[in-house]
Image (cartoon, rainbow, N blue to C red):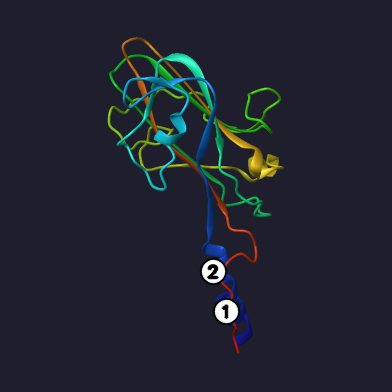
């Protein structure tokens, strides 16, 4: 019994650790920034380490923005993959916000393998801090099948598209992909 407890305590840091892939470059598409200027640096507006609605990228005309994600190491696990994408709307008009996690060696949209998508949702929330499913405070946990589709974690990209009836803008405020730490990457403890 003591040996089992010692093994559990040794593995506990590994079970609790995580890696985070966040936007680290715009590849295609231009959305307006917080400053109302078209730009190709949207990723700097949505790459914070924790949720922030202080800055955003804004769109309404169907332009797809493709962003590369920072590299994470394959966790050799099919569980614990969580995609968080936050957006809100400016007014109560018809709209659709689509977010897709894809694997694409150069994030150009050509030959991309879809990992998961929200399928296009109507953004009903008019306040910041809402997730991609509009329920607030939530996230999308990838199925084991979706996670197993990822073969090269360094080639992950996020595609977002917003369409709406003018003058409704969709404000994309934050995104990250959480994956488990690599086995053996946690702190080790010696147990006697």
For residue 7, side relative to residue 163 (left or right): right
Q: Which mark is drawn over residue 93?
A: none
| Any part of residue 131 in sight | yes
Q: How many marks?
A: 2
Residue pictured at 59% horizontal, 34% vertical = 157
Q: Residues within 10 Å of mark 2 (few under 14, many from 20)?
A: some
Residue pictured at 32% horizontal, 27% vertical = 34
| Residue 21 placement (x, y as % from top left) | 54, 45
Quadrant of image for the N terminus = bottom right
| Residue 47 placement (x, y as % from top left) | 44, 40
- On screen, residue 170 above or below 84: above
User: What secondary structure is found at the residue carrying circle 2?
Assistant: helix
- On screen, residue 4 above or below 156: below
User: What secondary structure is found at the residue carrying circle 1?
Assistant: loop
Q: From the image, tell me which residue sits under label 2.
A: 13
For residue 190, side relative to residue 32 (left or right): right
Q: Please tell me which of labels 1 and 2 falls first in the chain.
A: 2
Q: Residues within 10 Å of mark 1 (few under 14, many from 20)?
A: few
Q: From the image, tell me which residue sits under label 1.
A: 189
Quadrant of image for the C terminus = bottom right
């Amino acid at each position: 019994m003591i040996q089992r407890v010692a093994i559990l305590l040794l593995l506990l840091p590994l079970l609790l650790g995580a890696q985070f892939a966040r936007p680290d470059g715009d590849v295609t598409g231009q959305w307006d920034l917080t400053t109302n200027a078209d730009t190709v640096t949207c990723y700097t507006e949505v790459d914070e380490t924790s949720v922030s609605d202080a800055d955003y990228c804004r769109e309404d005309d169907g332009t797809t923005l493709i962003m590369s994600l920072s590299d994470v190491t394959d966790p050799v696990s099919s569980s614990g993959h969580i995609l968080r994408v936050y957006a809100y709307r400016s007014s109560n008009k018809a709209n659709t916000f689509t977010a897709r996690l894809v694997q694409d060696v150069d994030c150009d949209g050509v030959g991309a393998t879809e990992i998961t998508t929200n399928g296009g949702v109507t953004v009903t929330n008019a306040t910041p801090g809402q997730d991609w499913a509009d329920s607030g405070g939530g996230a999308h946990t990838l199925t084991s099948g979706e996670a197993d589709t990822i073969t090269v974690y360094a080639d992950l990209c996020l595609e977002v598209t917003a369409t709406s009836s003018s003058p409704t803008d969709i404000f994309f405020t934050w995104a990250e992909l959480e994956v488990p730490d690599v086995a053996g990457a946690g702190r080790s403890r010696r147990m006697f």
